[in-house]
Amino acid sequence: MALSNTSESGIITSRELRKAGVTARYTAKLCGPGGPWRRLMPGVILLRDAAPTRLQLLQAAVARFGPDVVVTGADALRARGVDCPVTREVHLLVPEYRRVPAEPGMLPRRTTRMPPPTLIDGVPFAPPARAALDLARLELDPSRIDELITLPLYWGLCTLDELSEELDSGNRRGSAAVRAALRRVDPEETYAHGLAQKVLSGCPLPSPSWNTTLCDRRGRPIGTADAWWDDIGMAWQFRAPKQGAANFHPLALTATGTVLVRCTIDQMRKVPLEVAAELVRAFAEAARTPRPKVRTIGRIDAA
């Protein structure tokens, strides 16, 4: 039995199995109790008896509903590296003329505005702005909407103008809360983080934590890091101090042995390669020296 069309993920359709000479009866047997395969959806088989990964589930959804559907929402953002929680259901965009059957775990939405997809791991994903807006429209909590709407900005995947244009192009019904959230966005904050993400995307460095307050051994705050590599004790500062915020002198950090890289938002925008090179150089320096005796408080801002 040759299954030359089988994808690397182990997802295959009943039609492909029949073309490979596997009868429907034999497929049913292999997917039955104690069998080595698992039927995920009608006409879609996983060639192993195990719970599917999220990627396998997405690939199965495309196999089930056809190549003209587009995955949006959290999955489309996560596919581009955004650290946001996965949703219980797979959010799908379907052409308005299509009729799709109800399927557990799937959330198909018919639309006249099918976005141009980006293919990642064999799955067509919606653009970041569309994905974030589709995700935010499902949310009722205003604070959560505020968080979701900034995700593609925060990770440098689109601009505020692109988000606004996408929102204006869509159906206005049910979008009042999302529009209000978009008006509350701090463009400087999200823009800075987006630029920083783009700089790091070209660096062979591990992911840092974000917006971290650094303390001495007694727990007294001595500085802040817009990005922080805890294992080696390296800090990166690129935001200008905000009026009224606690402003720490950089010497307080460097006196502890912390390797500190400082730049401006303008430098990240105009000379990102130079900023990236400086980060790599500083990381190598920090890796060669003992970790400074500092502690961290605050949060890891991944969303």
Image (cartoon, grey):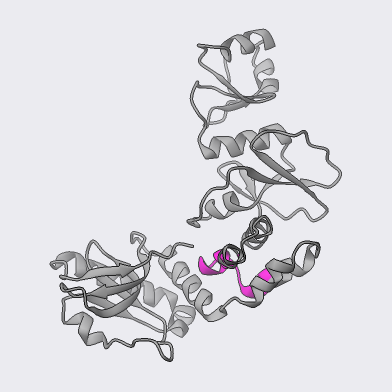
Q: Is residue 13 above or below residue 167?
A: above
Q: Is residue 288 above or below residue 75?
A: below
Name the residue: 68% across, 73% down.
Answer: 180
Residue 63: image quadrant is: top right
Q: Is residue 271 above or below residue 32?
A: below
- In the image shown, does 33 or 255 lie closer to the viewer? 33
Q: Is residue 82 above or below residue 237?
A: above
**Total count of labels:** 0
Looking at the image, residue 255 sits to the left or right of residue 200; the answer is: left
Q: Quadrant of the N terminus?
A: top right
Q: Is residue 155 magenta?
A: yes
Q: Is residue 169 magenta?
A: no
Tell me if residue 198 can be seen.
Answer: yes
Image coordinates of residue 276 in percent, x first then y, are 37, 72
Name the residue: 20% across, 81% down.
Answer: 254
Image coordinates of residue 229 in percent, x first then y, are 29, 65
Image coordinates of residue 90 in percent, x first then y, are 63, 43
- In the image shown, does 126 or 140 lie closer to the viewer? 140
- In the image shown, does 156 or 223 lie closer to the viewer? 223
Magenta span: predominant SS is helix
Tell me if residue 1 can be seen.
Answer: no
In the image, which residues are magenta? Answer: 149-163
Name the residue: 56% across, 21% down.
Answer: 38
Q: Residue furthest front?
A: 141
Name the residue: 16% across, 67% down.
Answer: 291
Residue 13: image quadrant is: top right
Q: Residue furthest left?
A: 290
- In the image shown, does 217 or 165 lie closer to the viewer? 217
Q: Residue furthest right?
A: 97
